[in-house]
Amino acid sequence: MKKTTLFLWVISLLVIAGCGQSTTPIVQTSTTPTTTTTTTQQTPTPTTTTTTTPKSAPTPTTNVITSKSISIANFQFSPASTEISVGWTIHRTNNDSVPHLVVADDGSFQSATLQPGDSFSHTFAQAGTFTYHCSIHPSMQGTVTVK
């Protein structure tokens, strides 16, 4: 009986194993057209980002004039009279071929002897009218009015 049982068991296994496999290939057909989609993965290209800082509006400048120039030439001050505000500076430059010495009539300022090309500056801290002359050439005279 053991042989018969073993024989039945082996046959059962063969039948079960045979039922799981098909000897005819199965071909699947379709009447619907197929579309093939290919997906390509691209490597990202490195990019350079340039940040442009917007130009700021130029800062308005105020050209506040706080000085005037007087030329010494041809044995005269030019201009001979000028008007300025308190705190302004007058620059006198000797553009003549001879030396000059600028002196305030009230003694409030005096230059050293100005050789040709030399200059002298004085800042006026008070309002008033200041007359001056060249002490070497007394006919040379000028006036500064400070308001």
Image: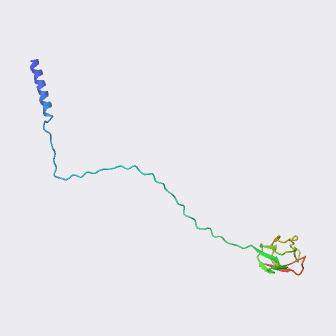
Question: Which residue is nearer to you in this view: 44 or 108?
Answer: 44
> Do we see residue 147 in this rendering?
no
Q: Nearer the viewer, residue 39 or 146?
A: 39
Residue at the front extreme of this rendering? 97
* Residue located at (13% from left, 28% from top): 14
The N terminus: image quadrant: top left
Quadrant occupied by the C terminus:
bottom right
Residue 140, relative to residue 44: is it above or below?
below
Number of marks present in the image shown: 0
Give the percent coordinates (x, y) of residue 41: 35, 49
Q: Is residue 37 left or right of residue 135?
A: left
Residue 14 drawn above or below residue 47? above
For the point 80% across and 76% down, the residue is 71
Residue 12 quadrant: top left
Residue 99 location (% of width, % of height): 87, 73
Query: Residue 55: x percent and y percent?
Result: 56, 64
Residue at image position (10%, 22%) is: 7
Q: Is residue 17 visible?
A: yes
**Scheme by which the image is coloured:** rainbow
